[in-house]
Every structure is written in structure tokens, then in C-alpha cells.
């Protein structure tokens, strides 16, 4: 991973002042406010948003329901709350590129509005989120942001993700609710002027819209490019999209690639024909002068617009830009002081945004450079870290900068101190504005030619405050296989804070725990009953928190915490007598769980993949999820694995997506085609009945698989089911979501030569992480010899 200094240098090179100033000038040209709405980070249409922002000057915001915590992770093993925190940071960085404000319906990590997994209807989704809760949060977002336009990303049609459908359904409702004085909210009323729907299908690799899109009533032109950078709108959009790395986003676009975005006007509260996005709306600061009741400030509004026009036209003359921007700031300040009540609701929030934008233009035009960063990414209550605050005044006569810090933080002589009472950092803030950063941040005062300008600038990757009482349990989950006698549990508790507090593990009656220097051994009763046991960890006699720190080079650091505990699953699982090789790519921990179950598991190296002699040491080889995409050389090694199967090996492939270098002909030993769009080839109901189609040894050896093994599953049954397969394979199970036809491609087994290939799209790795007993028993059976 690159060092922090290397990352700062890379970011500096990528965003030179001349480019930043040009992009900072663009939003001055419009007061139109456009809100995209979606269900997940990465749902936003970045190419369209880039054109609106950097060509048309439209002020952007994005309202997203969930943090994507139920999604997949292309870059690591974070899942659940940790993945949600990581994807939150990715979304914030994506917003930085577009200058877009971010609002989350999911206000905390424990919100009912959560990415609980795939769903196929808005009714199901809102049933879990809470319809009233979702609409109330949406109303608050709209009343705070005050958009002129709302545009959902997807259509509410069958064949579309239920989360997307829910957000579009509620977007229709919020048009009336946000303007309804009877709707319970403490925020001032706001009437959104227009609502557009995409006039294109959302069908593709994942979804399959059953109904055609509505007719286009206008089209956002995607041709041309940014006149200073030379980048197309799609290229700029992909620069933003590329921060969604957990979802594998970011695609190179050729210089000639462009697309248009057709929209359908679904609701309107303005008069006249709708020729373009801004029809019927005030477009510029000067247009606000024509609002009824604005007569007393009309001249200043027009004068402010004149200075804005001068600032934009003066680029790249830095001093001329700064002079005009400061003049516009002064005029807008006068308007805000004298603005009549009759137009304040329509004017004030727009001028507030212009003050922030103009201050940023002045800072860039004068070359004022303020950089602030801490030495440590993660800090504890009662600790301190070195902090650097560099100020370059550029063309300004004077520049002063000071830190604006959260409660419990202080700074003196280059040392940042975190008091013992400081709050833990929130990895899931509800609002993010790249132009008005939360504390910790820098307040900057600029003096030039007798004028004073103030703005807040972000701290570079602010340090994350961890909980005041914590302990790290490793491993945090253990298995007790009751079929394997003589087991003693061991675990380690380290990272105990505050030092030198002692850590203890509370155990049920009849259990015995012993430990020294953080290493614990735990004996349990001989007649231990099967089940899940949760053993709390104390630090200094106080319940501790365990922390997942998340640090990747492309985003700011973050962390999530939960109660520190050791979870112990006791289960009865007979094990086959096989030597298992595991081919993973870091996207699951199936090899860890198989070892914990008692299996003989060895990681298969790249060298072993190409050696028939090395492969012959294994009875069974498991290929982990996505490994064919992310494990270099694996695709090229498949012929060797096929030969190994033919001679008697058992190959188990866990689910892959069609784009994970899965070739239906050359990847499996015999033809298997993975279905897409994925919505049609998955079962999202984790309680769906599973019917066995054959009396196969996989259900009998070494464990008798029955209804109890399909109970207690979480998130869903499986996804990316096989669509078609060679006659050598037989489907072993069928299942269905409500009111849908049965699926038979979740578990296939085929005899190949003297060996066997098992392909499963069941999300067994996720069930193992969640300690579902049946997943371990079924996996043991899949590993058995033919």
C-alpha cells in the first residue's frame, strides 16, 4: 500500500490548481439543484451528473437509502457493517469528484434502512425498512437540501431490484409529502418542482426490467467534453465511479465515447413546456431578481450575477477571477441581509451555496494552499498524535488558519490531543458535503485588497477515534465439532485499551477458562449441547468493544465497533477422510472455516496449480468465490485441474459471476453456463424451501442432510445460479422465491472420468461467517470423494 505522502503527491498531481479553479467556477453559473436518488453506493449515473455539474453548473446531491453493507466486496473480506463503512467512504470520495452533497436514509450502522440482501419487490423492501420510517427520512432530506428536481436512478418495474423499486416508489410520494404541512416533520416545507424518471431500461447483467421504459420527454446531451481538461463527461463520471472499488467499478472510456441520457417528466409543478432540465426554473443568481417580492434586492442580485459572469469569463486570469468573485460575495452578503421574507425560502439556500462556492473560487484563484493532516490514522481517547498544518498564502496579503475540532479534541504546538471523554468517531455520518466538511477541519481567513474571505477546508484523512474500552478477540468465532473428541478452545485477546487493564472472558456455568498474557484456553463440559454460545469479553471489568479498522489507499480510514465477544458454535459434523487444497483470492475465508471444522486443508500456490505432481497430493480442491477473476494464472491452470479431475480428484467450485473469467466451455470440466441477469438466477428468500431432487451421496455421506441443515440461513439462499449444463451434471436441489418458478441450478454434481465436479451457487461462505451449522455439514459432504 502506498504511504500517506505518496498518496498526497498523487492526488496533488491529479488535481492541479488551474483545473480545480475551472471546475470551481462551473457551479457559479447556475442555482438549479438536482437530486439523484438511489438505493446503494454506485447507483448514481455519474456521466450524466458530470455533464450537469461541469458543463451546466447544476448543483448536485445524492440521496441513497443504504450503505451497501449487503453487497459484495471485490477488494477484501469486509462484510456487513465493516463493508457498509468502507462503501460509505467510497461514496464520499466519489462525491468529492463531482462536488456532490450526500444524504443517507440509513442514518446509523444499526438503522432499519439497511442493505439486507437482494429483494425483488418494493413491497418486500419497505416491509423491512419500514415504509413510514423511509418516507419520513426522505422528507427530512428533501426539506434540508431543497432540490428543484428529483431523478431516481431506476424504474419501479418487475424485474428490477426491490431496493431500487422502493426508492422510486417513495420518490413519487415525497413530492407531495415534503410540501404537506400535515406531514410530521420539524423542517420547513419544500415543494420539489419536477421529477424525472430514466427513459431507459435498467436491464443488464443484474436486472431484467419486465416493462419498457416510459417515453423520453427530454434528453440530456452527452456529447462534447469539458473544454479545459478535454475529458468527456463519461470519462469524468468514471473518475468518480472508480472509487467504488469494492464493487469493481470504474471503466476506461475511449476519447470518442459518449452517450445521451433520455428522461421522462413524471411530475411537474412549474408552468410552461418542458424543453430542457431548467425549463420553468430560475437558472442564475440574476434570474432570482424576477421572483415576485424580490424587488428590494433585485438590483443587487443582477449586479452579483454580473460579477459572476466576469469571474467566469476572466479565467484563467487569477487576479481578475478573485476580484470579481469577492465583489460577487459582497453583493450576495447584502442580499442575504436584506432579503424579504416573501422570497427567502426560494433564495436563501441558493445564495448560501453561492457564498461557499465563491469563497472556494477566491481561495483557488489566489493560490492559497492549506494542508492539514495527522500522523496517526487511528487514535484513542486519552492519546495524542502529531499534526501538521501547512499554510501557503499565494497571492493573498494575509492568510490565517485554525483548526475546528470536535468536542474533546484540542491542539497545541503541533500536537493533537484526544481527551478521555472524546466520542468515538462515527463511520456512518448521515450527511456529507465536500464543500462544507465536518470537524475536524480548518477554518481559513483570507485577506486581499482590503477584503476578507472565510471558508472551511477539509483535513486530509482525519484520524478516527476508537472506543474508550476495547479488546480484539482473535479468532472471534470458534467451532466445536462434537464429533471430534478432545478439543480445547484457544483464542487470543490483545489490543486491550486502556492499558494496563486486564481482559477476562465470561463463560457459562461448567466452562473453565485460563489465560496469561492475552492467550486463553477454554474447556467446556463433555456433554456440551449443540448450539451457539456468546462469551462476553471485559476490559478492566467493563464490557469491551471490538473494532474493525478499515484502511485502503483510495479512501479515508474508518472503523466500526461492536461488543467484544467470543462466539462459539457447537455442532455435530462428520468429516470425510480427504486432503483438501484451497484456491482462494482473498474474497472469502472458507479455507479457515474448513480447518476450524477439523479438515486437513492446504493453500494451493501458483506453482502447485501448474504441477500435476503437486495436484496429485490432494483428494479435493476447492476454488473460492471470484477466484477465477482475481487469482492470477488460475484460468490458464484449468486444463491441469481438468486432468486432475479425470484421474479421480473432486473439484468444488463456489459461486462465480459470468464476468469472473468464467467461460462456460473451458472453465468447468464440462459445460456450465451461469445465468444472467442475476435477478433471474437467484433465490433471495433465505427461508425458501429447499427440495432434494435425488437420493445422492452428497446428502448422505458423511452427514445426513435434512431440513434442519437449511434452517437459520441469512441474507439469501444463493445467486448466480447455473442456467444450463452438460448432461454429465445432475441438479441436486430446487428452490424458489415466492410466486416464481423453481430454480435447479444452485447445486450441480457431475462425474467426470474417475473424478467429480461439484458447482454450487449457494452462499456457503456467508453462512459459515454467520455460524450456520448446516453450511458446515453440507460443505463437508461436498468435499467427499466420488
Image (cartoon, rainbow, N blue to C red):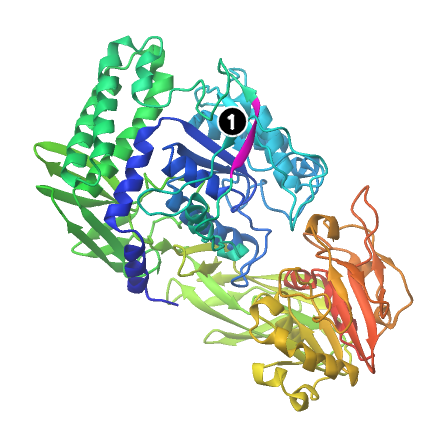
**Quadrant of the rendering where the C terminus is positioned:** bottom right
Tell me which secondary structure the magenta stretch mostly adopts: strand
- In the figure, is residue 415 to the left or right of 378? left
- Residue in the foreground of this view, choosing between 659 and 382: 659
Count of numbered circles on the image: 1
- In the figure, is residue 99 to the left or right of 503? left
Can residue 743 be seen here? The reply is yes
Residue 265 forms part of the magenta stretch: yes
The image shows residue 476, relative to residue 450, as above or below, that is: below
**Measuring 37% from the left and 54% from the top, which residue is drawn there?**
464
Label 1 belongs to which residue? 139
**Measuring 63% from the left and 60% from the top, which residue is drawn there?**
659
Across and down, in percent, residue 97 comes to 38, 46
The image shows residue 475, relative to residue 140, as above or below, that is: below
For mark 1, give the secondary structure: helix
Name of the residue lying farthest toward the bottom: 613
Across and down, in percent, residue 247 comes to 54, 55
Name of the residue lying farthest toward the front: 256
Can residue 101 be seen here? The reply is no
Q: Which residues are magenta?
A: 260-266
Residue 785 forms part of the magenta stretch: no
- In the figure, is residue 124 to the left or right of 403? right
**Measuring 30% from the left and 64% from the top, which residue is drawn there?**
6
Amino acid at each position: 500500500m502506498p504511504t500517506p505522502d505518496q498518496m498526497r503527491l498523487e492526488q496533488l498531481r491529479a488535481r492541479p490548481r488551474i483545473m480545480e479553479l475551472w471546475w470551481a467556477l462551473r457551479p457559479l453559473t447556475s442555482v438549479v439543484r438536482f437530486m439523484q436518488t438511489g438505493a446503494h453506493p454506485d447507483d448514481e449515473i455519474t456521466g450524466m451528473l458530470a455533464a450537469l455539474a461541469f458543463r451546466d453548473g447544476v448543483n448536485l446531491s445524492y440521496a441513497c437509502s443504504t450503505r451497501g453493507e449487503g453487497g459484495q466486496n471485490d477488494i477484501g473480506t469486509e462484510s456487513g457493517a465493516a463493508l457498509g463503512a468502507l462503501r460509505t467512504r467510497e461514496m464520499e470520495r466519489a462525491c468529492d469528484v463531482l462536488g456532490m452533497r450526500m444524504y443517507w436514509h440509513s442514518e446509523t450502522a444499526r438503522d432499519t434502512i439497511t442493505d439486507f440482501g437482494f429483494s425483488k419487490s418494493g413491497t418486500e423492501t419497505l416491509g423491512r425498512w419500514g415504509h413510514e420510517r423511509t418516507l419520513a427520512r426522505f422528507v427530512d432530506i428533501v426539506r434540508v437540501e431543497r432540490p428543484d428536481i428529483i431523478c431516481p436512478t431506476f424504474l419501479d418495474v418487475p424485474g428490477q431490484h426491490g431496493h431500487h423499486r422502493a426508492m422510486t416508489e417513495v420518490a413519487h410520494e415525497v413530492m407531495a409529502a415534503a410540501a404537506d404541512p400535515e406531514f410530521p416533520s420539524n423542517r420547513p416545507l419544500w415543494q420539489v418542482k419536477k421529477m424525472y424518471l430514466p427513459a431507459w431500461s435498467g436491464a443488464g447483467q443484474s436486472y431484467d426490467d419486465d416493462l419498457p421504459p416510459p417515453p423520453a420527454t427530454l434528453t440530456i446531451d452527452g456529447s462534447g467534453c469539458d473544454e479545459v481538461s478535454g475529458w468527456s463527461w463519461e470519462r469524468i463520471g468514471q473518475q468518480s465511479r472508480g472509487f467504488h472499488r469494492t464493487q469493481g467499478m470504474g471503466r476506461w472510456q475511449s476519447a470518442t465515447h459518449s452517450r445521451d441520457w433520455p428522461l421522462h417528466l413524471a411530475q411537474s409543478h412549474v408552468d410552461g413546456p418542458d424543453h430542457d432540465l431548467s425549463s420553468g426554473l430560475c437558472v442564475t443568481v440574476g434570474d432570482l431578481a424576477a421572483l415576485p417580492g424580490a424587488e428590494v434586492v433585485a438590483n443587487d442580485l443582477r449586479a452579483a450575477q454580473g460579477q459572476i459572469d466576469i469571474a467566469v469569463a476572466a479565467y484563467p486570469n487569477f487576479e481578475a477571477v478573485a476580484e470579481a468573485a469577492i465583489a460577487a460575495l459582497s453583493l450576495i452578503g447584502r442580499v442575504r441581509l436584506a432579503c424579504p421574507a416573501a422570497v427567502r425560502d426560494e433564495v436563501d439556500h441558493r445564495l448560501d451555496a453561492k457564498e461557499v462556492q465563491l469563497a472556494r473560487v477566491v481561495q483557488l484563484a489566489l493560490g492559497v494552499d492549506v494542508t492539514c493532516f495527522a500522523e496517526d490514522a487511528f487514535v484513542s481517547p486519552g492519546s495524542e498524535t502529531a499534526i501538521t498544518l501547512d499554510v501557503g498564502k499565494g497571492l493573498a496579503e494575509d492568510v490565517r488558519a485554525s483548526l475546528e475540532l470536535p468536542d474533546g479534541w484540542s491542539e497545541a504546538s503541533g500536537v493533537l490531543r484526544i481527551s478521555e471523554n472524546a466520542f468515538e468517531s462515527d463511520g456512518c455520518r448521515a450527511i456529507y458535503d465536500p464543500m462544507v466538511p465536518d470537524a475536524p477541519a480548518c477554518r481559513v481567513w483570507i485577506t486581499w485588497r482590503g477584503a476578507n474571505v472565510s471558508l472551511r477546508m477539509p483535513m486530509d484523512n482525519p484520524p478516527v477515534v476508537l472506543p474508550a474500552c476495547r479488546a480484539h478477540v482473535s479468532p472471534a468465532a470458534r467451532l466445536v465439532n462434537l464429533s471430534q473428541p478432545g478439543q480445547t478452545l484457544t483464542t487470543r485477546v490483545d489490543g486491550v485499551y486502556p492499558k494496563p487493564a486486564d481482559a477476562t472472558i465470561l463463560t457459562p456455568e461448567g466452562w473453565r477458562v485460563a489465560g496469561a498474557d492475552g492467550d486463553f484456553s477454554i474447556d467446556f463440559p463433555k456433554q456440551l449441547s449443540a448450539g451457539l454460545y456468546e462469551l462476553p469479553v471485559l476490559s478492566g471489568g467493563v464490557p469491551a468493544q471490538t473494532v474493525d479498522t478499515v484502511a485502503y489507499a483510495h479512501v479515508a480510514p474508518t472503523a466500526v465497533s461492536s461488543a467484544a465477544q467470543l462466539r462459539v458454535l457447537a455442532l455435530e459434523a462428520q468429516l470425510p477422510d480427504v486432503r483438501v487444497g484451497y484456491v482462494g483470492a482473498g474474497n472469502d475465508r472458507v479455507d479457515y472455516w474448513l480447518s476450524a471444522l477439523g479438515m486437513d486443508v492446504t493453500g494451493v500456490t501458483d506453482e502447485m496449480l501448474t504441477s500435476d505432481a503437486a495436484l496429485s497430493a490432494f483428494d479435493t480442491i476447492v476454488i473460492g468465490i471470484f477466484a477465477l477473476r482475481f487469482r492470477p494464472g488460475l484460468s490458464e491452470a484449468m486444463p491441469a485441474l481438468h486432468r486432475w479431475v479425470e484421474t479421480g480428484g473432486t473439484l468444488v467450485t463456489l459461486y462465480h459471476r459470468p464476468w469472473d473469467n468464467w467461460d462456460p466451455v473451458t472453465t468447468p470440466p464440462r459445460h456450465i453456463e451461469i445465468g444472467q441477469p442475476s435477478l433471474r438466477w437467484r433465490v433471495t428468500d433465505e427461508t425458501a424451501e429447499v427440495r432434494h431432487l435425488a437420493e445422492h451421496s452428497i446428502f448422505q455421506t458423511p452427514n445426513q442432510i435434512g431440513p434442519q441443515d437449511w434452517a437459520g440461513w441469512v441474507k439469501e439462499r444463493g445467486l448466480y445460479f447455473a442456467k444450463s449444463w452438460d448432461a454429465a451434471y445432475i441438479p441436486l436441489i430446487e428452490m424458489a422465491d415466492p410466486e416464481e418458478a423453481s430454480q435447479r441450478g444452485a447445486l450441480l454434481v457431475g462425474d467426470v472420468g474417475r473424478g467429480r465436479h461439484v458447482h454450487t451457487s449457494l452462499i456457503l461462505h456467508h453462512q459459515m461467517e454467520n455460524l450456520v451449522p448446516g453450511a458446515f455439514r453440507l460443505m463437508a459432504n461436498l468435499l467427499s470423494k466420488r
